[in-house]
Image: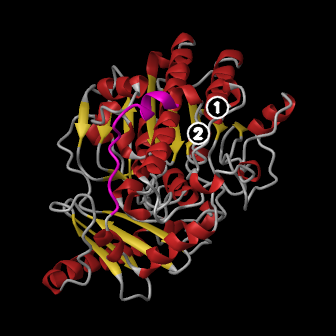
Protein backbone atom coordinates (compact mmCIF):
# COMPACT_ATOMS: atom_id res chain seq x y z
CA UNK A 1 0.00 0.00 0.00
CA UNK A 2 1.20 3.56 -0.62
CA UNK A 3 1.60 4.30 3.10
CA UNK A 4 3.01 0.86 3.93
CA UNK A 5 0.03 -0.37 5.95
CA UNK A 6 -1.94 -3.50 5.02
CA UNK A 7 -5.52 -3.80 3.93
CA UNK A 8 -7.59 -5.24 6.78
CA UNK A 9 -10.62 -7.43 6.12
CA UNK A 10 -12.77 -8.36 9.13
CA UNK A 11 -15.45 -11.00 8.59
CA UNK A 12 -18.00 -11.61 11.36
CA UNK A 13 -20.72 -14.24 11.40
CA UNK A 14 -23.69 -14.14 13.73
CA UNK A 15 -24.17 -16.89 16.30
CA UNK A 16 -21.54 -19.36 15.06
CA UNK A 17 -20.30 -21.99 17.51
CA UNK A 18 -16.64 -22.93 17.77
CA UNK A 19 -17.31 -26.55 16.75
CA UNK A 20 -18.41 -25.66 13.21
CA UNK A 21 -15.13 -25.65 11.26
CA UNK A 22 -13.34 -28.78 10.03
CA UNK A 23 -9.91 -27.17 10.37
CA UNK A 24 -10.51 -26.63 14.09
CA UNK A 25 -10.96 -30.36 14.63
CA UNK A 26 -14.55 -31.11 13.62
CA UNK A 27 -14.50 -33.55 10.68
CA UNK A 28 -18.28 -33.57 10.24
CA UNK A 29 -18.02 -30.04 8.77
CA UNK A 30 -17.47 -28.92 5.14
CA UNK A 31 -15.56 -25.63 5.41
CA UNK A 32 -12.66 -25.68 2.90
CA UNK A 33 -12.16 -21.90 2.76
CA UNK A 34 -12.04 -21.40 6.51
CA UNK A 35 -9.80 -24.47 6.71
CA UNK A 36 -7.39 -22.70 4.38
CA UNK A 37 -7.31 -19.62 6.61
CA UNK A 38 -6.54 -21.86 9.58
CA UNK A 39 -3.81 -23.81 7.79
CA UNK A 40 -2.11 -20.64 6.56
CA UNK A 41 -2.91 -18.40 9.53
CA UNK A 42 -3.25 -18.32 13.31
CA UNK A 43 -6.15 -19.85 15.25
CA UNK A 44 -7.04 -18.76 18.76
CA UNK A 45 -8.76 -21.85 20.12
CA UNK A 46 -9.85 -20.43 23.47
CA UNK A 47 -11.40 -17.14 22.42
CA UNK A 48 -14.43 -16.01 24.43
CA UNK A 49 -17.01 -13.30 23.91
CA UNK A 50 -17.88 -10.63 26.49
CA UNK A 51 -21.68 -10.96 26.24
CA UNK A 52 -24.02 -13.77 25.13
CA UNK A 53 -26.03 -11.67 22.67
CA UNK A 54 -25.25 -9.66 19.55
CA UNK A 55 -25.19 -5.96 20.43
CA UNK A 56 -23.17 -5.95 23.66
CA UNK A 57 -20.68 -8.46 22.24
CA UNK A 58 -20.14 -6.44 19.07
CA UNK A 59 -19.95 -3.19 21.01
CA UNK A 60 -17.10 -4.68 23.07
CA UNK A 61 -15.27 -5.73 19.90
CA UNK A 62 -15.54 -2.31 18.30
CA UNK A 63 -14.78 -0.29 21.43
CA UNK A 64 -12.38 -2.49 23.40
CA UNK A 65 -14.38 -2.28 26.63
CA UNK A 66 -16.50 -4.70 28.66
CA UNK A 67 -20.30 -4.27 28.62
CA UNK A 68 -20.42 -2.89 32.16
CA UNK A 69 -18.01 -0.16 31.01
CA UNK A 70 -19.85 0.73 27.81
CA UNK A 71 -23.25 0.45 29.47
CA UNK A 72 -24.34 -1.65 26.48
CA UNK A 73 -25.73 -4.69 28.29
CA UNK A 74 -28.31 -6.17 25.91
CA UNK A 75 -29.73 -6.06 22.40
CA UNK A 76 -31.36 -2.72 21.61
CA UNK A 77 -29.02 -0.62 23.76
CA UNK A 78 -27.65 2.47 22.02
CA UNK A 79 -24.27 1.93 20.34
CA UNK A 80 -22.94 4.48 17.82
CA UNK A 81 -19.17 4.91 18.22
CA UNK A 82 -15.99 2.85 18.22
CA UNK A 83 -12.41 2.52 17.04
CA UNK A 84 -13.36 2.48 13.35
CA UNK A 85 -13.45 6.26 13.73
CA UNK A 86 -9.75 6.22 14.68
CA UNK A 87 -8.94 3.98 11.70
CA UNK A 88 -10.68 6.42 9.37
CA UNK A 89 -8.89 9.41 10.90
CA UNK A 90 -5.57 7.62 10.36
CA UNK A 91 -6.14 7.34 6.62
CA UNK A 92 -7.95 4.03 6.14
CA UNK A 93 -10.92 3.90 3.79
CA UNK A 94 -13.49 2.17 5.99
CA UNK A 95 -16.33 0.20 4.39
CA UNK A 96 -19.05 -1.81 6.09
CA UNK A 97 -20.90 -4.37 4.01
CA UNK A 98 -24.01 -5.35 5.89
CA UNK A 99 -24.41 -6.55 9.46
CA UNK A 100 -22.86 -4.54 12.29
CA UNK A 101 -25.87 -4.42 14.63
CA UNK A 102 -25.28 -0.83 15.76
CA UNK A 103 -28.14 0.97 17.46
CA UNK A 104 -29.46 2.82 15.49
CA UNK A 105 -28.75 0.50 12.57
CA UNK A 106 -27.33 3.26 10.33
CA UNK A 107 -24.99 4.92 12.86
CA UNK A 108 -21.93 6.07 10.84
CA UNK A 109 -19.40 4.46 13.23
CA UNK A 110 -16.55 6.06 11.28
CA UNK A 111 -17.28 4.16 8.05
CA UNK A 112 -17.07 6.06 4.79
CA UNK A 113 -19.78 3.81 3.35
CA UNK A 114 -22.29 1.51 5.04
CA UNK A 115 -24.56 -1.06 3.39
CA UNK A 116 -26.83 -2.23 6.20
CA UNK A 117 -28.41 -5.67 6.53
CA UNK A 118 -29.83 -6.67 9.89
CA UNK A 119 -31.35 -9.78 11.49
CA UNK A 120 -33.12 -12.11 9.12
CA UNK A 121 -36.27 -12.15 11.28
CA UNK A 122 -36.83 -8.77 12.95
CA UNK A 123 -39.81 -8.57 15.25
CA UNK A 124 -39.00 -6.06 17.99
CA UNK A 125 -36.40 -3.38 17.29
CA UNK A 126 -36.24 -2.72 13.56
CA UNK A 127 -39.39 -4.63 12.71
CA UNK A 128 -40.28 -2.18 9.94
CA UNK A 129 -36.74 -1.26 8.96
CA UNK A 130 -36.09 -1.78 5.23
CA UNK A 131 -32.45 -2.83 4.81
CA UNK A 132 -30.42 -3.49 1.64
CA UNK A 133 -31.55 -7.12 1.55
CA UNK A 134 -35.21 -6.14 1.93
CA UNK A 135 -34.80 -3.71 -0.96
CA UNK A 136 -33.26 -6.39 -3.18
CA UNK A 137 -36.05 -8.85 -2.41
CA UNK A 138 -38.69 -6.20 -3.07
CA UNK A 139 -37.06 -5.16 -6.35
CA UNK A 140 -37.18 -8.77 -7.53
CA UNK A 141 -40.84 -9.12 -6.50
CA UNK A 142 -40.35 -11.42 -3.52
CA UNK A 143 -41.56 -11.34 0.07
CA UNK A 144 -38.89 -12.29 2.61
CA UNK A 145 -39.28 -15.57 4.47
CA UNK A 146 -40.03 -14.53 8.03
CA UNK A 147 -41.92 -15.35 11.19
CA UNK A 148 -45.37 -14.25 10.05
CA UNK A 149 -45.17 -16.63 7.09
CA UNK A 150 -43.51 -19.49 8.96
CA UNK A 151 -46.29 -19.34 11.55
CA UNK A 152 -48.78 -20.30 8.84
CA UNK A 153 -47.12 -23.69 8.43
CA UNK A 154 -48.79 -26.67 10.09
CA UNK A 155 -45.41 -27.86 11.35
CA UNK A 156 -44.16 -24.49 12.65
CA UNK A 157 -44.28 -25.56 16.29
CA UNK A 158 -41.98 -28.54 15.80
CA UNK A 159 -39.39 -27.22 13.33
CA UNK A 160 -37.15 -25.52 15.96
CA UNK A 161 -36.44 -22.71 13.52
CA UNK A 162 -35.20 -24.98 10.70
CA UNK A 163 -36.72 -24.11 7.32
CA UNK A 164 -35.63 -24.51 3.70
CA UNK A 165 -34.74 -21.37 1.75
CA UNK A 166 -37.33 -21.45 -1.04
CA UNK A 167 -36.53 -18.23 -2.92
CA UNK A 168 -33.71 -17.89 -5.49
CA UNK A 169 -30.36 -18.87 -4.00
CA UNK A 170 -28.69 -15.54 -4.80
CA UNK A 171 -31.26 -13.86 -2.54
CA UNK A 172 -30.40 -15.95 0.50
CA UNK A 173 -29.09 -13.51 3.12
CA UNK A 174 -25.53 -14.85 3.28
CA UNK A 175 -25.22 -15.27 -0.48
CA UNK A 176 -26.57 -11.75 -0.87
CA UNK A 177 -23.90 -10.47 1.52
CA UNK A 178 -21.16 -12.25 -0.42
CA UNK A 179 -22.52 -10.80 -3.63
CA UNK A 180 -22.72 -7.29 -2.22
CA UNK A 181 -19.14 -7.47 -0.97
CA UNK A 182 -17.82 -8.71 -4.31
CA UNK A 183 -19.85 -6.04 -6.12
CA UNK A 184 -18.16 -3.34 -4.04
CA UNK A 185 -14.70 -4.78 -4.62
CA UNK A 186 -15.23 -5.22 -8.36
CA UNK A 187 -16.91 -1.90 -9.15
CA UNK A 188 -15.45 0.67 -6.74
CA UNK A 189 -12.09 2.31 -7.49
CA UNK A 190 -9.30 1.09 -5.25
CA UNK A 191 -8.59 3.61 -2.48
CA UNK A 192 -5.34 5.59 -2.56
CA UNK A 193 -4.56 4.31 0.94
CA UNK A 194 -5.28 1.08 2.80
CA UNK A 195 -8.75 -0.44 3.02
CA UNK A 196 -10.61 -1.59 6.13
CA UNK A 197 -13.52 -3.76 5.02
CA UNK A 198 -15.96 -5.22 7.55
CA UNK A 199 -18.23 -7.93 6.18
CA UNK A 200 -21.02 -9.12 8.48
CA UNK A 201 -22.88 -12.31 7.57
CA UNK A 202 -26.42 -12.62 9.03
CA UNK A 203 -26.09 -16.41 9.42
CA UNK A 204 -26.05 -18.93 10.92
CA UNK A 205 -28.34 -16.95 13.26
CA UNK A 206 -31.93 -18.27 13.10
CA UNK A 207 -34.13 -18.88 11.36
CA UNK A 208 -31.85 -21.71 10.20
CA UNK A 209 -32.70 -21.41 6.53
CA UNK A 210 -30.12 -22.94 4.16
CA UNK A 211 -30.73 -23.90 0.57
CA UNK A 212 -31.94 -27.51 0.72
CA UNK A 213 -29.06 -28.98 -1.31
CA UNK A 214 -26.62 -27.93 1.42
CA UNK A 215 -28.65 -29.79 4.04
CA UNK A 216 -28.56 -33.24 2.46
CA UNK A 217 -24.92 -34.12 3.33
CA UNK A 218 -25.44 -33.16 6.98
CA UNK A 219 -28.69 -35.11 7.32
CA UNK A 220 -26.82 -38.16 6.03
CA UNK A 221 -24.11 -37.87 8.72
CA UNK A 222 -23.98 -38.97 12.33
CA UNK A 223 -23.74 -35.50 13.87
CA UNK A 224 -22.32 -35.09 17.39
CA UNK A 225 -25.24 -33.79 19.46
CA UNK A 226 -24.96 -33.72 23.25
CA UNK A 227 -27.72 -35.49 25.17
CA UNK A 228 -29.72 -33.37 27.61
CA UNK A 229 -29.81 -35.15 30.97
CA UNK A 230 -32.09 -34.77 33.94
CA UNK A 231 -29.02 -34.10 36.07
CA UNK A 232 -28.02 -31.20 33.83
CA UNK A 233 -31.51 -29.67 33.88
CA UNK A 234 -31.99 -30.28 37.60
CA UNK A 235 -28.79 -28.46 38.47
CA UNK A 236 -29.61 -25.28 36.57
CA UNK A 237 -30.52 -22.09 38.45
CA UNK A 238 -34.08 -20.82 38.42
CA UNK A 239 -33.12 -18.00 36.06
CA UNK A 240 -32.38 -20.53 33.32
CA UNK A 241 -35.37 -22.74 34.15
CA UNK A 242 -37.67 -19.75 33.67
CA UNK A 243 -35.95 -18.81 30.41
CA UNK A 244 -36.43 -22.32 29.00
CA UNK A 245 -40.13 -22.14 29.79
CA UNK A 246 -40.44 -18.66 28.30
CA UNK A 247 -38.78 -19.75 25.06
CA UNK A 248 -41.21 -22.66 24.85
CA UNK A 249 -44.16 -20.27 25.19
CA UNK A 250 -42.99 -17.37 23.01
CA UNK A 251 -41.27 -17.77 19.64
CA UNK A 252 -38.07 -15.83 19.02
CA UNK A 253 -36.38 -15.55 15.61
CA UNK A 254 -38.87 -18.07 14.19
CA UNK A 255 -38.04 -20.64 16.90
CA UNK A 256 -40.66 -22.02 19.24
CA UNK A 257 -38.48 -23.95 21.68
CA UNK A 258 -39.48 -27.46 22.71
CA UNK A 259 -38.70 -28.62 26.25
CA UNK A 260 -38.66 -32.26 25.12
CA UNK A 261 -37.51 -32.21 21.51
CA UNK A 262 -36.93 -35.54 19.80
CA UNK A 263 -33.54 -36.70 18.49
CA UNK A 264 -34.89 -36.32 14.95
CA UNK A 265 -35.97 -32.72 15.57
CA UNK A 266 -32.61 -31.83 17.10
CA UNK A 267 -30.72 -33.46 14.24
CA UNK A 268 -32.71 -31.51 11.67
CA UNK A 269 -32.08 -28.25 13.51
CA UNK A 270 -28.35 -29.01 13.78
CA UNK A 271 -28.07 -30.07 10.14
CA UNK A 272 -29.76 -26.88 8.91
CA UNK A 273 -27.54 -24.75 11.11
CA UNK A 274 -24.36 -26.47 9.90
CA UNK A 275 -25.51 -26.27 6.28
CA UNK A 276 -25.81 -22.50 6.72
CA UNK A 277 -22.20 -22.44 7.95
CA UNK A 278 -21.10 -24.23 4.79
CA UNK A 279 -22.98 -21.68 2.69
CA UNK A 280 -21.12 -18.90 4.53
CA UNK A 281 -17.82 -20.70 3.96
CA UNK A 282 -18.48 -20.62 0.21
CA UNK A 283 -19.06 -16.88 0.39
CA UNK A 284 -15.83 -16.41 2.34
CA UNK A 285 -14.04 -18.14 -0.54
CA UNK A 286 -15.89 -15.98 -3.06
CA UNK A 287 -14.82 -12.80 -1.27
CA UNK A 288 -11.21 -13.97 -0.91
CA UNK A 289 -11.05 -14.79 -4.62
CA UNK A 290 -12.31 -11.31 -5.51
CA UNK A 291 -9.93 -9.63 -3.07
CA UNK A 292 -7.07 -11.53 -4.67
CA UNK A 293 -8.14 -10.70 -8.22
CA UNK A 294 -8.32 -7.00 -7.36
CA UNK A 295 -4.89 -7.00 -5.70
CA UNK A 296 -6.11 -6.39 -2.16
CA UNK A 297 -4.46 -9.55 -0.83
CA UNK A 298 -0.97 -8.50 -1.96
CA UNK A 299 -0.63 -7.03 1.52
CA UNK A 300 -3.58 -7.85 3.73
CA UNK A 301 -4.66 -9.12 7.12
CA UNK A 302 -7.86 -11.16 7.15
CA UNK A 303 -9.68 -11.71 10.46
CA UNK A 304 -12.59 -14.12 10.92
CA UNK A 305 -14.75 -14.48 14.04
CA UNK A 306 -18.32 -14.57 15.38
CA UNK A 307 -20.20 -12.59 18.02
CA UNK A 308 -21.32 -15.65 20.08
CA UNK A 309 -22.50 -19.22 19.68
CA UNK A 310 -25.79 -21.11 19.85
CA UNK A 311 -26.94 -23.83 22.29
CA UNK A 312 -28.98 -25.58 19.57
CA UNK A 313 -30.79 -27.49 22.29
CA UNK A 314 -27.66 -28.36 24.28
CA UNK A 315 -28.35 -28.10 28.03
CA UNK A 316 -32.02 -27.87 27.05
CA UNK A 317 -31.69 -24.29 25.80
CA UNK A 318 -32.52 -22.33 22.68
CA UNK A 319 -30.11 -19.87 21.10
CA UNK A 320 -27.95 -17.78 23.50
CA UNK A 321 -28.38 -15.84 26.81
CA UNK A 322 -26.50 -18.49 28.83
CA UNK A 323 -22.82 -18.78 29.74
CA UNK A 324 -22.07 -22.29 28.49
CA UNK A 325 -19.00 -22.67 26.28
CA UNK A 326 -21.28 -23.45 23.33
CA UNK A 327 -22.27 -19.76 23.58
CA UNK A 328 -19.17 -18.02 24.89
CA UNK A 329 -16.41 -19.75 22.85
CA UNK A 330 -16.11 -18.62 19.24
CA UNK A 331 -13.79 -19.09 16.25
CA UNK A 332 -11.02 -16.48 15.94
CA UNK A 333 -8.67 -16.71 12.96
CA UNK A 334 -6.06 -14.25 11.68
CA UNK A 335 -4.56 -14.83 8.22
CA UNK A 336 -1.72 -12.76 6.78
CA UNK A 337 0.81 -14.78 4.74
CA UNK A 338 4.18 -13.05 4.62
CA UNK A 339 3.38 -11.04 7.73
CA UNK A 340 2.56 -13.74 10.30
CA UNK A 341 3.61 -17.40 10.25
CA UNK A 342 1.00 -19.91 9.13
CA UNK A 343 -0.28 -22.96 10.93
CA UNK A 344 -0.10 -21.39 14.37
CA UNK A 345 -2.51 -22.64 17.04
CA UNK A 346 -2.69 -20.44 20.14
CA UNK A 347 -4.45 -22.10 23.07
CA UNK A 348 -4.20 -19.28 25.64
CA UNK A 349 -7.36 -17.57 26.86
CA UNK A 350 -8.38 -14.40 25.06
CA UNK A 351 -11.48 -12.29 24.57
CA UNK A 352 -13.02 -11.81 21.16
CA UNK A 353 -12.75 -8.04 21.72
CA UNK A 354 -8.95 -8.48 21.80
CA UNK A 355 -9.11 -8.58 18.00
CA UNK A 356 -9.90 -4.83 18.11
CA UNK A 357 -6.56 -3.56 19.49
CA UNK A 358 -4.82 -6.19 17.34
CA UNK A 359 -6.30 -4.54 14.25
CA UNK A 360 -5.37 -1.09 15.52
CA UNK A 361 -1.76 -2.10 16.16
CA UNK A 362 -1.47 -3.68 12.72
CA UNK A 363 -2.81 -0.39 11.33
CA UNK A 364 -0.34 1.67 13.36
CA UNK A 365 -3.09 3.39 15.34
CA UNK A 366 -2.25 4.13 19.02
CA UNK A 367 -4.31 2.32 21.64
CA UNK A 368 -6.16 4.29 24.34
CA UNK A 369 -4.59 3.76 27.77
CA UNK A 370 -8.02 2.96 29.18
CA UNK A 371 -8.77 0.13 26.73
CA UNK A 372 -9.64 -3.16 28.42
CA UNK A 373 -9.08 -5.31 25.34
CA UNK A 374 -5.53 -6.61 24.91
CA UNK A 375 -3.71 -6.87 21.59
CA UNK A 376 -2.97 -10.35 20.26
CA UNK A 377 -0.08 -9.11 18.15
CA UNK A 378 2.57 -10.82 20.34
CA UNK A 379 0.83 -14.16 19.72
CA UNK A 380 0.73 -13.51 15.98
CA UNK A 381 4.41 -12.56 15.97
CA UNK A 382 5.30 -15.90 17.55
CA UNK A 383 6.23 -14.56 20.99
CA UNK A 384 5.95 -16.65 24.16
CA UNK A 385 2.32 -15.67 24.63
CA UNK A 386 0.30 -17.36 27.37
CA UNK A 387 -2.93 -15.38 27.15
CA UNK A 388 -5.19 -14.10 29.90
CA UNK A 389 -5.58 -15.74 33.29
CA UNK A 390 -9.36 -15.30 33.11
CA UNK A 391 -12.02 -14.26 30.63
CA UNK A 392 -15.32 -12.59 31.54
CA UNK A 393 -18.80 -12.19 30.07
CA UNK A 394 -21.90 -10.39 31.29
CA UNK A 395 -25.46 -9.54 30.30
CA UNK A 396 -28.38 -7.47 31.58
CA UNK A 397 -32.06 -8.26 31.89
CA UNK A 398 -34.00 -8.24 28.63
CA UNK A 399 -37.22 -9.72 27.28
CA UNK A 400 -35.76 -13.24 27.30
CA UNK A 401 -33.28 -13.29 30.21
CA UNK A 402 -36.00 -11.93 32.46
CA UNK A 403 -35.40 -13.33 35.94
CA UNK A 404 -32.12 -11.58 36.76
CA UNK A 405 -31.02 -7.96 36.57
CA UNK A 406 -27.43 -8.89 35.72
CA UNK A 407 -25.49 -12.08 34.94
CA UNK A 408 -21.69 -12.39 35.02
CA UNK A 409 -19.27 -15.18 34.08
CA UNK A 410 -15.63 -15.70 35.01
CA UNK A 411 -13.77 -18.54 33.31
CA UNK A 412 -10.23 -19.68 33.91
CA UNK A 413 -8.38 -22.56 32.32
CA UNK A 414 -9.97 -25.15 34.59
CA UNK A 415 -13.01 -23.62 36.26
CA UNK A 416 -16.03 -21.48 35.43
CA UNK A 417 -18.39 -19.54 37.70
CA UNK A 418 -21.65 -17.81 36.72
CA UNK A 419 -23.07 -15.22 39.14
CA UNK A 420 -26.58 -13.75 39.21
CA UNK A 421 -27.14 -10.42 40.95
CA UNK A 422 -29.18 -10.59 44.19
CA UNK A 423 -29.43 -14.38 44.01
CA UNK A 424 -28.13 -17.26 46.11
CA UNK A 425 -28.07 -19.45 43.00
CA UNK A 426 -25.29 -19.70 40.45
CA UNK A 427 -23.18 -22.13 38.44
CA UNK A 428 -19.75 -23.60 39.14
CA UNK A 429 -18.11 -26.06 36.76
CA UNK A 430 -14.92 -28.09 37.02
CA UNK A 431 -14.00 -27.89 33.34
CA UNK A 432 -11.13 -30.35 33.68
CA UNK A 433 -13.40 -33.17 34.84
CA UNK A 434 -16.66 -31.89 33.36
CA UNK A 435 -15.91 -30.18 30.00
CA UNK A 436 -19.54 -30.55 29.00
CA UNK A 437 -20.64 -28.36 31.94
CA UNK A 438 -23.25 -30.82 33.16
CA UNK A 439 -22.56 -31.03 36.92
CA UNK A 440 -23.23 -27.75 38.74
CA UNK A 441 -21.06 -27.63 41.87
CA UNK A 442 -22.35 -24.25 43.13
CA UNK A 443 -24.14 -25.70 46.14
CA UNK A 444 -21.60 -28.42 46.96
CA UNK A 445 -19.84 -27.55 50.23
CA UNK A 446 -16.75 -29.43 49.08
CA UNK A 447 -16.14 -26.66 46.52
CA UNK A 448 -16.92 -23.65 48.69
CA UNK A 449 -13.31 -22.42 48.62
CA UNK A 450 -13.16 -22.61 44.82
CA UNK A 451 -16.41 -20.64 44.61
CA UNK A 452 -15.04 -17.99 46.95
CA UNK A 453 -11.82 -17.82 44.95
CA UNK A 454 -13.65 -17.11 41.70
CA UNK A 455 -16.00 -14.63 43.35
CA UNK A 456 -12.88 -12.83 44.60
CA UNK A 457 -11.57 -12.77 41.02
CA UNK A 458 -14.85 -11.18 39.89
CA UNK A 459 -14.63 -8.52 42.59
CA UNK A 460 -11.03 -7.60 41.76
CA UNK A 461 -11.81 -7.52 38.04
CA UNK A 462 -14.68 -5.08 38.48
CA UNK A 463 -12.63 -2.84 40.77
CA UNK A 464 -9.68 -2.85 38.40
CA UNK A 465 -12.00 -2.17 35.47
CA UNK A 466 -13.51 0.87 37.18
CA UNK A 467 -10.07 2.25 37.98
CA UNK A 468 -8.55 1.55 34.57
CA UNK A 469 -11.43 3.09 32.59
CA UNK A 470 -11.99 6.12 34.83
CA UNK A 471 -10.86 8.45 32.05
CA UNK A 472 -12.87 6.78 29.32
CA UNK A 473 -15.13 9.12 27.35
CA UNK A 474 -18.86 8.54 27.42
CA UNK A 475 -18.91 9.39 23.69
CA UNK A 476 -18.59 5.68 23.00
CA UNK A 477 -22.19 5.23 24.11
Q: How far apart, in angstroms, are the residues tagged by discs 2 and 1?
A: 8 Å
Q: Residue 103 bears which disc, if any?
A: none
Measured as percent of width and height from the top left, residue 93 is found at 63, 31
Quick one: 160 or 451, which is closer to the camera?
160
- Is 127 displayed left or right of 73 in the figure? right
Q: Position of residue 221 (x, y in %)?
A: 37, 33
Dot 2, how many residues are within 10 Å of its Cα: few (below 14), some (14-19), or many (20+)?
Answer: many
Q: Does dot 1 land on a helix, a strand or a loop?
A: helix
Q: In which quarter of the image is the C terminus?
A: bottom right
Please tell me whether residue 173 is drawn above or below residue 454 in the rendered image: above
Whether residue 461 is visible: yes
In screen coordinates, is 391 left or right of 297? left
Q: Residue at x 61, y 70 (%)?
A: 249
Magenta span: chief secondary structure: loop
Q: Name the residue at 19% across, 62% down.
A: 414
Disc on res. 177: 1
Residue tagged 2: 200
Residue 78 lies, in percent from the top left, at 67, 63
Q: Can residue 366 be seen in this view?
A: no
Q: Give the range drawn in magenta.
A: 215-228
Q: Is disc 2 in contact with disc 1, using a CB cutoff of under 8 Å?
A: yes
Q: Residue 126 in the image: x percent, y percent?
A: 75, 56
Residue at horizontal 15%, vertical 62%? 433
Single out the residue that lies furthest toward the top.
293
Position of residue 340 relative to residue 451, above or below, is: above
How busy is the neighbourhood of tag 1: few (under 14 within 10 Å), some, or many (20 plus)? many
Q: In which quarter of the image is residue 131?
A: top right
Amino acid sequence: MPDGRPNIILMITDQQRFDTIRGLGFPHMDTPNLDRLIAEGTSFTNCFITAPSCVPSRASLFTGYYPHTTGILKNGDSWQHGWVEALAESGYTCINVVKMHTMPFEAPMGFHERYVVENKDRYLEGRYYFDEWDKALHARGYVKQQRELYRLRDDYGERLGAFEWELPEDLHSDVFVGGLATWWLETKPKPDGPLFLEIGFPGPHPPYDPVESYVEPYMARDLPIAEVTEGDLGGQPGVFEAMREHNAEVDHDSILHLLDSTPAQRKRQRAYYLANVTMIDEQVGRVLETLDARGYLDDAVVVFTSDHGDCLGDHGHSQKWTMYDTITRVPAIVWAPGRFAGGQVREGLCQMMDLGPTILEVAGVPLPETMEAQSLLPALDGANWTGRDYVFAEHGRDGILRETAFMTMVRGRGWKLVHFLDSNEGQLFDLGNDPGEVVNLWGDPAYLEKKRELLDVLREWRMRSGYQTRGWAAAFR
